[in-house]
Every structure is written in structure tokens, then in C-alpha cells.
Image (spheres, coloured by chain):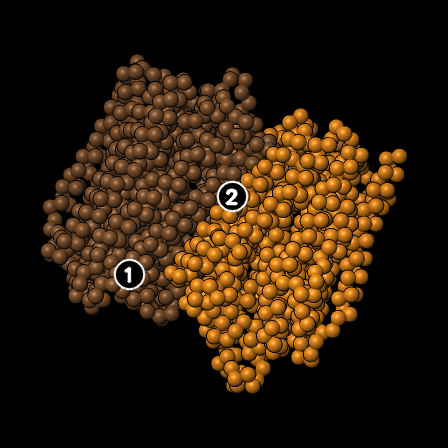
Chain colours: A orange, B brown
């Protein structure tokens, strides 16, 4: 009978995954029907497509070498019975689907950019519809592929290989590691590409030469637009695929540990499945009249996401009640806590980074005293903005743990924490749609500018872009909040794993008064700092090579500044590609080697300390860097909108400096740290058997 | 017999403390014999003195209100038997001596600045001798008063009140809290003052009006020089008094817990006493010929500190051997590990922040692409520079713990960690001397500039100042490293305290898998971020008021820019004073309330998590902020020395922006966090009985 439940469970979730993918497919077809616009627009869009495709192809080539090496390593470990033979394959599949999510999202985005620009020639609303639809394709591809991967593995391992629940959850954690590794490459590589191009284009074009943003005379302008696609779209796709899958599988694993039953595995999978359906319904609420303004559009988007969240909150109750029984209804409150926390963190991210609120306006104001003070106030804002998300997560963790009954059985409480992360991410289909359309609008603006469309069009794409910044803030809040909760759940999974692979009398207390645990915390806390430094310096190095190239072209290409000759766009794209691929290696290797090294030297207790340290500091650094960056970006926009002496003033120059510093903060280092804190946990889990058997102290 | 040992112990350390103070007194008399220079110099020096005295007077008035309130709170707690009656008085005495250390240091510094400038009219070497002697006064006042306070309380409690060892160590921890609170006020208030004045003077004077640094036409120039004294001198004095005393008393407390004998208390006290003597000997090695250049001077300083360190390393061996016996000789290696770690962290601080090494030069180089890239590279440098100090502390902790025998008896291991901190700080007398002379040289430079002395004199004071930056880096390394070790020791003391005040069956495991502990880590990790943000924003606000005032004076005072009329210096001093006193309250209150609130809500286990989180993140943030700031400062100096297009170039402007951002990093937020991580521990210890008896979860 158990088997039949599990078969049903697997097929239901598989079905919902397919529905999500189908919805994405149909939406994509709809978008592709629209017109791409004038010949110039088509030409520019084609150049962006070409650059993005070339980058992704080369990135995946580099990454596949890494995956091949890791595959061999995992096979060797499997040979020595330190892992099961499913692990290497699960690892590959996680990486593959994560990469695929990014690839499809990017394909769609590069197809939608010119169509959005063209639609904006008609009205703001039409532009939004196309951009949002393209974003939906990405959103539902990510959740569809995520749930497909989870349910397919579940069905294969359960029904074909007839593995036990704990063996299944073990194998699944490895495909999380594959997804995380891929996501880190995509985020770091894409993030370096996009910001090197952006910083390079801005520094020489805007600041030195004084030409507008996205001016076709700027040699880095195509690279900048390519960057939006490979960084903000493909990188984000891979990233959120990883978050989504990570939260589900950590909940699966802890469910098995807590209840030792298939029902506990059912909850996160069914919750994710319901989430996909409710998110699809939500998208139908995103409608406005033809004459909508920005505020109405935002309302329309909010209506969609709010509907989905409320619907999931309602449906989750009977789900928990009927699957796990009345006695476990406390777990429902864990899910609810997660949902609410996601919304709260999203709101406060917006509060701190949107120019409709006081904090960002104060950053704008500090431009009165120059670039140094705008930097100081932006950093101050980012650091201060960590408080509320920390408190929200703390309260969410305590509610999830204690409402689930963690006081009596810690395992159930930890499962509750994992479920809160799944709850938070259950609306991902639609929140990601509202998030992913931002870079598409940004690109559309670039195309409008470069094709010399009427300034009205550019104004519309700017309005979309600025709306996109608001929704992106919400999206970031979800990504960061869920990363912290998932990392906590993965810590618990690690302890389970140690218990499983260790001797029967293994000591499973991780007392902070034990120096191995304590120094572990210190090392773990250091990791996000190092990681942020490495990624930021990579952006700096890559940007400097772009700066030099752009300066060279301005100097050497006769007639360029007069607009008579085209710059050599491809060289800049190629430089960005090579620089970012070179630079993405080191940070990723650090993230994989450090947890193994810590384990081999100070043992599995040190690893738990390290995970706690990385989770705590990583969470803070991610919020700090994302929010500082977001605030600088919008502080600049606020000045450009005519406040504090407006565009071209000394204030504006200072704000551009702030924005440039914020670029790697918010689009490279910050989001990569989200992945980092989960990747270190997954790596630790996969290498647990090695660490438990061999360690120095 | 035991009593006689303790009496001897108390008198020996008291004797060494008095020797230290006597040495400081004699050195002070020697310095005061030198000539103050021309009438203009005297006048300027008098203005600085006046401003500094006025500030300190008002600061102490504000602080004494805080101390009075806390005194009443502690008395109420004593009345309800949550504390002994010694605690309120110990608290006051710690605050008093910490404040006194700062006060004496500042008095000396303001007396020595014009004398140093005057001596520089003769030779670099004479200038160094006076500045270094004045620094020594501060160094030996701090260690002398520190050890005086410790040994006096020891004698009183032991010989008059005949308390047990554990009661003595309890009372002593409270005077640590008094010292920490005072230190935090001094560091934060002084740090805000000095940086508001500095940033304000630079932004309007250097950047906007284009007049040189320390130009007498700048209305904020006296405030800037007052700031050096109240922030860099008085603030640092109070700060290091707290570090020194904190390390000794945490070692005392853990010694009692580990050995339950008076001998274990003897080690840290005697080590500190020996440290004073060896530091005095060390100062006699700081001699050079009349024609010394900068390199020779640095060598001379190094010779002094190295002699002291080696001498302590030698004498500590028989100390441990004879007092605690052959079986505990492992503790010697803990002391040695501390000494070596301090030197290593100091060296790597210098490596990352001095323009003789690659990292800072790279920051200079990034000025080629403007202020945004210099900010990014400086932040990257600071974050990356955390790795080595973390590894050094990790290794030091592991060696101290395991060499002491922590594997068999954790209490002894924790005592070992505390002793390593005492070892690190045992050379404080001389390292502080080499550190404190920097601001004196800085002031001397200001006086030379303002009095219109020959440019040669200014060059000499600049050389001294730059040498001061190097030695200050070393000093900072000690302060940060010892703060981390002391915080670890205080965590252990907290656990001891909980054990003492809790019921006999109290659960003393602090497992990271316990959600209360885990969320404690998260909250604790957040604290340094908030604290850094608050202090940075305070500097920003205070600086903006100065900027406005300086701009106003430039505009409104006719003949000012032509040098015909003097600006209104006093108004700027007064503005800085009021702003910094207002701004110092909030951060300090946060540091005191958060640990109590965490305890009352999530209990004593959450507190241990919080302490670990604050220690880890605080350590990292302190290094990051200090080193970024130091690197920007020296990157600017490197450009001013003629590299990368030199003074007045676009590169220089970018570097000034970096330096301005770095000012609150390195002189306000960074060093305050060092105090924060110890203050939260001490507050937790003092309120342990309340928290154990009343908490929500």
C-alpha cells in the first residue's frame, strides 16, 4: 500500500511539474507571436542574442569540465563505498537542470527584449504584458524543471530501485549539490560579466565621455545588454532553481528523519506542486486597462502574487491535516510562518531600497556632500537593513520549530524549519515572473535607445525598469530569506548524515564551548567575506580591462564619437566573456574546497560550527550588499528624476559613483553568497563519510 | 599560608603597577621640559588643549549620568541578591580608571604636540623622541592603572573582606564591564568627533575650496586637531585599558574555575606585572643617532618591542613552571601562542595597509579608473585581509586549548585561551607607546602647518606620521586579536557564571542544533553590523553639520580666503562636541540592552549563541573596516608621494574619496567593535542571574 501512495505522490507532482512547463511553453509561444520591431531593433537584438549565446556556450564548456572532474571524484568515492552509485548521476542531473533553467530563461529574455521595446511604442501596458509573460516563462520553467527533477528521481529511486526513504533523500541531496555548483558558476560568471560591462560602459561612457547610458557610440553597450541576460537572467534562473530544489530536498530529508514515513516526504513535494498551480492562477490576475500608469501596474502585479500566496496558505491546511493528521497540524503554522516571512522580508527589502521611502532618499540627499558621504550612507543603510530580516528569520525559525512540536522531538521541529522554507518559495513561479521581467525591460530600454526610438518609448521602458527594481527587491528578499532557512535545514541534514555514516556511538553534540565547534564558527563566518572580496575584485579586474578597451576605441576609431562609424562591440563582448570565465573559477573552488578541508582538519564538529558561521554571516552579508547596492541604484534614479539638482549635477556624479560601487555588491557578490551558504552545506553532506572517517583533530 | 601567598602576589603586582606609573610620571616630566616653540605655536596648541579639555569635561558629565543610572540598577540587583554588593562599586571603579587613562593620555598628547613640532625644527630624531616619550606616558599609564585596579581590588577583597577566589573573580568581571562601557563611550564619542571634523575639514577645505590640509583658513582645522586628541588618544587609551584589564580578569576567572587555587590567579597577574617591567626595559632600546632616517627609526622602535616580547617569552617559562608546576607547563605554550599571534596579526595588518606592500599599492592603482573602483578595491582588500588573522586566531585557540590539556579538562583549556590573550597584551606598555605617538605627530604636523613653519618641518612631521601609521597598524592588530581571544574567554566565564547562579541541575550544553542557540548566533552576528551602521551614520550626520558650518564661514566671513581674517574655530569645535555627545548614546545603549533582551527572551542558551555570533562577526568586521580604512589612507599618501599622477590629479581626488570613506571605518566603527564584543560578554555575565531566573522561552 505504501508503494501505491508513493507512486501516486510521484505522479501527482510530476503532473504538476509538467503543467508548469506546459504553461511556460504556451506563454513562450504567445510572446514569440509579437513583432520584433524595426530592422535596427532586430539587428541590435540579434547582436545581443549572439553575444549571450556565445557566452553561455563557452561557460557551459568550462563548467562541464568541472562537472566531469567532480563526477570522477564522486565515482571514486562510490567505489570505496563512501557514497552510493546514484550520487554521481544525481549530481550531474542537478547541474544539468539548473543550467537548463538559466538557458531557457535567457533564450526567452533575448527573444522578448526587442518585442517589449516595440510594444512600448504602443503603450506601457503592452510592454509590461510582454515582459511579464517572458518573465513567467522563466518562472515556470524554473519551478517546472525543479519539481520534474525531484519527482522523477523520486519515482525512479522508489519504484524502480525500491530504495528506502532515507536512501532516496540522501541521493537527492547530491543533486542539490550539482544544482548549487552550477548555480554558483552561473551567478558568479554571469555576475562578473554583467557588472564588468556595466561598470566599464558607465565609467568611460557616462562619466568620462559624458554620453548617455545605452548610447550606441559606446563600445561596451552591447556587452552591457548581453550581461543583463547572462547575469540577471541566466544567473538568476540557475540560482533560483537551486534555491527551490534545495528547500524541497532538505525538507524531504528531514521529513524522513522525523517521521520515517513517506507521508512526511509528501508534504514538501505536494506543497511545491500546489504552489505551481496557484502561481499559474495568480498570473491571470495580472491584468490592467490600456491606460494604466506605473502605480496601477504595480498593483496588478501585487494582486497576482498576493492571490497565489493566500491560495497556498488556504490549501496547505487540509494538505497537512489529511496527510500527516491532526496531531501534526502545527507544521501548517511552520509553512504559514515561511510564507509570511517571505512577504515581510520582501517588503522591508523594498522599504530600504526603493526611492519612495525615506532611507534611499536620505542616501540621495547625502550626495549634497559628495561621493564619499553617499558611499558611507549607502553602506550604513545596507548594514542597518539587516536587522529586520534577521528578526523575521529568528521569529520564523522559533515559530516553525516550536509550533511543529520541536520541544518534544527536535527532529520534527527541524522538519518544520525546512517546511517554512518550502512555504516561502512555494509562490516562486509567480514571484520569479515579476522578478525576471526587470532585466528584460532594462534590455528593451537599451534597444529603444540604440535604435533611436522616440524618447516616449524610452520613458516607458524606464518606467517598466523602475517597477522591475521594486519587484526585484521582493524577489531578492525571498531568495535571501529562503537561503537562510534552507541552510538551517541543511545543517540538520548534515547532522543526520553524520549519524548515518558514523559509528553507532558517535557524539552528536555540537557545543559552542567545544573549541573545534567555536573555531569552526569563526572560519565559517570568514568565508562570505572572502567570497565577497574575491567576486568584487574579479568584477574590478574585469571592469578595468573593459575600461581600457573602451578608452582605446574612443581614441583610435576615427569618427566614432561623431556617430559616423560603429564601435567594435564584439571585442567588448569577447573580453567580458573571457574575463568572467577566468574569474569565476577561483571563488567556486574556494566554496567547494573549504568545507572539505575544514572537515579533514578539525573534524565533523568543526564543520557544523562552520556551517552555522557561514549561514549567519552569509545571510547578513547578502542582505547588506544587496540592499546597499539597490539603494544606491535607486538613489541615482531619484536624482535623475530631478531631485537634488538632477541629472548632470555634482550630486548626480556622486550618485553614479555610488551606483558603480553598488553594482558588484547587488548583482555579483550579494546574490552569490545566497548560493554559497547552501553549497557549503551540500558539499559537507556529500563528503560527510570521508570527513567522519578521516580527520586530523 | 595561602593568604600569605595571595598577599605577596597582590603586593608584587601592585608594586609593578606603581613602577609603571612612576615611569610614566618621570617620562612626562622629561617631555614637559622641552620648549613649546614660537608664540603662534603656543597659541594654536593652547586652542587645541582648550577644545580637548572642554570636550572631555562634557563627555565625562554625560557619561557620569549613565554610570549613576547603572549604579542604581546594580544596587537594586544587589538588594535582591542577584549580585553581591561589591559589584556596583567595582563597576564604577572600572569606568573611572578607564576614563582616567584616556584623560592622562590626552593631557600628555596635547602638551607634547607643539613640543614635537618644535623639536622637528631641529631634526627628525628629536621629534620622534618627544612623540615617542609622550606615547610612553600613555602606554604606561594604561597598563599601570590597569594593573593597579586589578591588584587593589584583589588585595581588598582577599585580605580585607576575605572573599573566596570565585567571589573575587566575579566582582572583578564587573569592573571589566565598567571599563568596557567607559571605553565604548570614549571610542564612539571620540571617534565621531575626530572623523566628523576630519571629514568636514577635508570635504570642504581640500576638495571644494582646494586649500591644503591643516590650512589655518579652514574653520574646522582646530576641531580636526582636537579630534586627534579626544578620539585617537583619549579614545584609544580608554579602549586599551579595557582590553588589558579584560584579558587579565577573564583569565583570573577561568583560572579559578580550572584550578580552584590562588596560583592560577597568580599567573595572569604576574604575567602582566612582568610585562610592565620588560616593556620599560624595551623603551631604552628605542635610540638612534642624530641623522636617522625613517627606516632607521622604524628599526629602533621594532627593536624595543621585539626585546620586550622576547624577554617576556623567556621569563614566562619559569613563571608557569614554578607557580603551577611541571604538569601544567603546557599553559606556557598558550602564552607563547598568544605572543606570537599578536606579532603575526600585527605584521599582516601592516602588510595589508602599508604602501610598501602590494595590496595598498593596488588600491592606489585602481584610482586610475576613478573613485568607484578605488572604493571597490579597498573594500575587497579589507574583506580579504580577514583570512590570515582568522587562521592565526584559530590556530592560537587550538594550540592554547590542547597544549594546556583541554582535551582532558576543558576548563584548563579555556584558561589556556584566556592566558594567550594576556600573553598577547603583556607587551602593551611599549606597543601602545609606539601606537599613541602617531596622533601626536599628526597634531604636530597640523601645528607646523598652521604656524607657517618651514616646509622641511612639515616633511619631518609627515615622516613621523607615516611611521605612526605603520606602528598603529601593529597596535590595531594586537587590539583586535586580543579582543577575539578575550571574548572567547569571557564566553567561558559566562558559562561558569550561569553554572554558579543557576539551579544545580542546570543544562550547560550549548548545542548548535538547539534553535535557541542557533538564532542566538544569528542575532549576535547581526549586532556588529548594526553597530557599525549606527556609528558610521553618526559620523555622517555630524560631518554634514560641520560641512555646512565650514561652507557658511567660507561664504559669510569676508577676507577669510585671503587669510586676512581668522575663521571661527570655536564654533566648529563646539558643533563637533555637541554632535558627538548626542550621537554616542544610541550605539552604547544598543550594546548594553541587546544582550539583556536576548537573555530575557530566548534564555541563557541564546545568550551563548549570541556571544559566539558577535565574537565571530565582530572580529571580522573590525579587521575588515580597520584594514580597508588603513589601506585607503595610505593609498592616498602613496599618490601624494608622487605616484599615479600625484597630488592634485584625478587619481588623488579619487583617493581622497577613499580616505574619507575609510575615516569612520578605521577610526570610529572598526575599533568600537573591538570593545563591543567584550562589552556584550561582560553585560551578559553581570545580568546572568536575572536571565537564568526570568526568561520567556
In this rendering, the answer to whether B334 lies above or below A52 is above
Q: Look at the numbered disc 2 and give the secondary structure of its residue.
A: helix
Mark 1 belongs to chain: B
Q: What residue is rendered at 50% in x and 62% in y? A: A638
Q: Is residue B286 above or below residue B89?
A: below
Tell me if A635 is positioned left or right of A28 in this view: left
Separation of residues labelled 1 and 2 (CA atoms): 37 Å
Protein chain holding label 2? A
Instruction: Specify few, some or many for label 1: CA neighbours under 10 Å numbering under 14, 14-19, or 20 or more.
Output: few
On the rendered image, what quadrant is the N terminus of chain A found in? top right
Q: Which residue is mark 1?
A: B552
Q: In the image, what residue occupies the spot 74% across and 60% down?
A: A137
Where's residue B389, x and y in %?
44, 46
Element class at badge 1: helix
Hey, which quadrant is residue B282 in on the image? top left
Q: Determine which residue is flagged by label 2.
A: A387
How many C-alpha atoms fall within 10 Å of the one at disc 2: few (<14), some, or many (≥20)? some
Q: Is residue B119 left or right of residue B691?
A: left
Residue A173: give x, y in percent of width and height: 71, 44
Report which quarter residue B513 is drawn in. Answer: top right
Q: Check the picture and name the quadrant holding the C terminus of chain A.
A: top right
Amino acid at each position: 500500500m505504501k508503494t501505491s501512495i508513493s507512486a501516486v505522490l510521484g505522479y501527482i507532482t510530476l503532473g504538476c511539474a509538467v503543467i508548469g512547463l506546459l504553461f511556460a511553453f504556451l506563454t513562450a509561444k504567445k510572446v514569440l507571436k509579437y513583432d520584433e520591431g524595426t530592422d535596427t531593433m532586430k539587428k541590435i537584438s540579434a547582436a545581443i542574442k549572439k553575444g549571450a549565446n556565445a557566452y553561455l556556450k563557452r561557460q557551459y564548456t568550462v563548467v562541464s569540465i568541472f562537472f566531469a572532474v567532480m563526477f570522477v571524484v564522486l565515482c571514486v568515492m562510490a567505489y570505496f563505498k563512501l557514497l552510493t552509485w546514484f550520487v554521481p548521476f544525481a549530481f550531474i542531473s542537478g547541474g544539468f537542470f539548473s543550467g537548463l533553467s538559466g538557458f531557457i530563461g535567457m533564450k526567452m529574455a533575448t527573444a522578448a527584449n526587442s518585442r517589449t521595446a516595440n510594444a512600448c511604442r504602443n503603450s506601457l501596458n503592452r510592454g509590461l504584458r510582454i515582459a511579464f509573460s517572458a518573465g513567467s516563462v522563466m518562472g515556470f520553467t524554473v519551478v517546472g524543471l525543479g519539481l520534474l527533477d525531484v519527482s522523477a528521481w523520486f519515482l525512479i529511486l522508489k519504484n524502480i530501485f525500491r530504495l528506502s526513504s532515507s536512501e532516496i533523500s540522501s541521493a537527492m541531496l547530491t543533486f542539490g549539490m550539482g544544482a548549487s555548483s552550477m548555480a554558483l558558476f552561473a551567478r558568479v560568471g554571469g555576475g562578473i560579466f554583467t557588472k564588468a560591462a556595466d561598470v566599464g560602459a558607465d565609467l568611460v561612457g557616462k562619466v568620462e565621455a559624458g554620453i548617455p547610458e545605452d548610447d550606441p557610440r559606446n563600445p561596451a553597450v552591447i556587452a552591457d545588454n548581453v550581461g543583463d541576460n547572462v547575469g540577471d537572467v541566466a544567473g538568476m534562473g540557475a540560482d533560483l532553481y537551486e534555491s527551490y530544489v534545495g528547500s524541497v530536498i532538505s525538507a524531504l530529508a528531514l521529513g524522513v528523519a522525523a517521521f520515517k514515513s513517506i507521508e512526511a516526504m509528501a508534504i514538501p513535494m505536494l506543497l511545491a506542486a500546489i504552489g505551481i498551480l496557484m502561481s499559474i492562477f495568480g498570473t491571470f490576475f495580472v491584468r490592467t486597462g490600456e491606460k494604466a500608469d506605473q502605480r496601477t501596474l504595480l498593483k496588478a502585479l501585487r494582486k497576482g502574487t498576493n492571490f497565489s500566496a493566500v491560495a497556498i496558505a488556504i490549501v496547505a491546511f487540509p494538505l497537512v491535516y489529511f496527510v500527516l493528521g491532526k496531531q501534526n497540524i502545527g507544521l501548517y503554522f511552520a509553512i504559514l510562518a515561511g510564507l509570511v516571512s517571505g512577504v515581510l522580508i520582501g517588503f522591508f527589502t523594498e522599504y530600504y531600497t526603493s526611492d519612495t521611502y525615506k532611507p534611499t532618499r536620505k542616501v540621495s540627499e547625502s550626495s549634497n556632500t559628495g561621493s564619499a558621504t553617499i558611499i558611507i550612507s549607502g553602506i550604513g543603510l545596507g548594514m542597518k537593513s539587516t536587522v529586520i530580516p534577521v528578526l523575521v528569520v529568528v521569529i520564523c525559525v522559533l515559530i516553525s520549530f516550536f509550533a511543529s512540536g520541536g520541544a518534544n522531538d527536535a527532529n520534527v521541529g527541524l522538519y518544520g524549519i525546512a517546511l517554512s522554507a518550502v512555504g516561502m518559495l512555494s509562490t516562486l513561479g509567480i514571484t520569479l515572473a515579476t522578478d525576471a521581467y526587470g532585466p528584460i525591460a532594462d534590455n528593451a530600454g537599451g534597444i529603444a535607445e540604440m535604435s533611436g526610438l522616440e524618447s516616449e518609448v524610452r520613458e516607458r521602458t524606464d518606467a517598466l525598469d523602475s517597477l522591475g527594481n521594486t519587484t526585484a527587491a521582493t524577489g531578492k528578499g525571498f531568495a535571501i530569506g529562503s537561503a537562510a532557512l534552507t541552510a538551517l535545514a541543511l545543517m540538520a541534514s548534515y547532522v543526520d548524515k553524520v549519524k548515518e555514516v558514523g559509528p553507532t556511538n558517535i557524539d552528536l553534540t555540537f557545543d559552542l564551548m567545544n573549541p573545534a565547534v567555536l573555531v569552526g564558527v569563526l572560519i565559517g563566518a570568514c568565508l562570505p567575506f572572502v567570497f565577497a572580496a574575491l567576486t568584487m575584485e574579479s568584477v574590478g579586474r574585469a571592469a578595468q580591462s573593459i575600461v581600457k578597451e573602451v578608452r582605446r576605441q574612443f581614441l583610435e576609431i576615427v569618427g566614432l564619437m561623431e556617430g559616423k562609424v560603429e564601435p567594435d562591440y564584439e571585442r567588448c563582448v569577447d573580453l567580458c566573456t573571457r574575463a568572467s570565465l577566468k574569474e569565476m573559477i577561483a571563488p567556486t573552488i574556494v566554496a567547494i574546497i573549504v568545507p572539505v578541508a575544514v572537515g579533514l582538519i578539525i573534524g565533523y564538529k568543526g564543520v557544523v560550527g562552520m556551517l552555522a558561521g557561514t549561514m549567519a554571516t552569509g545571510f547578513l552579508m547578502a542582505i547588506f550588499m544587496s540592499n546597499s547596492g539597490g539603494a544606491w541604484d535607486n538613489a541615482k534614479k531619484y536624482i535623475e528624476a530631478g531631485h537634488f539638482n538632477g541629472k548632470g549635477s555634482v550630486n548626480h556624479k556622486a550618485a553614479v559613483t555610488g551606483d558603480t560601487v553598488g553594482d558588484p555588491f547587488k548583482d555579483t557578490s550579494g546574490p552569490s553568497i545566497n548560493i554559497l551558504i547552501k553549497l557549503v552545506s551540500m558539499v559537507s553532506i556529500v563528503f560527510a563519510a570521508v570527513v567522519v572517517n578521516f580527520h586530523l583533530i
